[in-house]
Amino acid sequence: MKPMIMSFILLLLLFPLSQDVYATPSIIEFQAEIVTDTEDYEICYDAFQEQYSCQEADNDKKKQSTERFIFHLGIYPGASKEDVQLRLANALGIDVSEVKHWNVAITFDGGETIEVKEKGKRSL
């Protein structure tokens, strides 16, 4: 029994129970204006000033649906412009090649930003 206890203690020393956990940076400000042949999309989100903008009429629904939309995009600091465009297009259910104008600005809680400003149609 003593060797088993010693083995267990040795394992605890070699493999600590606590692990470093790093939080994913959160989007604190998001502004997107996307223009296609048939539709214009404008999405605004500011976590600190509690400003939300989407197509819902009820303010609580605006906040919930905008926060959910932003969270489910899965955009992270350092993401490429193409990745941001693809994720937004997929979330909105549009084809990237149909977009005539991109104007996107994203700020993360660590201070990092991503900007996508492009005109004209193109496919990724």
Image (cartoon, grey):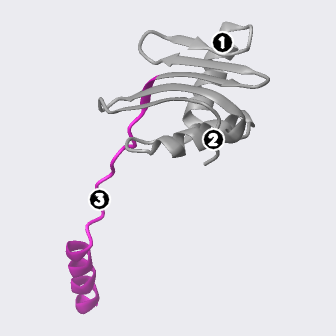
Q: Eyeballing the image, is 52 above or below 102?
A: above
Question: Is residue 55 shown left or right of residue 110?
Answer: right
Please report the bounds of the magenta region as a residue range: 1-29
Q: Position of residue 33 (x, y in %)?
A: 59, 20
Mark 1 crowd level (few <14, some 14–19, many ≥20, 10 Å Cα):
few
Residue at the spot of label 1 = 60
Residue 119 image-quadrant placement: top right
Sooner in the amino-acid sequence: mark 3 or mark 2: 3
In front of the other: label 1 or label 3? 1
Q: Position of residue 114 (x, y in %)?
A: 40, 33
Q: Eyeballing the image, is 13 above or below 61?
A: below
In front of the other: label 1 or label 2? 2
Sooner in the amino-acid sequence: mark 1 or mark 2: 1
Residue type at mark 3? Ser
Q: Which of the two residues, 121 or 57, is positioned nearer the viewer here?
A: 121
Mark 3 crowd level (few <14, some 14–19, many ≥20, 10 Å Cα):
few
Is residue 89 in the magenta section? no
Is residue 81 at least partly visible in the picture? yes
CA distance separating discs 1 and 2 = 36 Å
Question: Is residue 92 shown left or right of residue 7?
Answer: right
Residue drawn at x 43%, y 45% is: 79
Residue 38 image-quadrant placement: top right
Residue type at mark 1? Asp
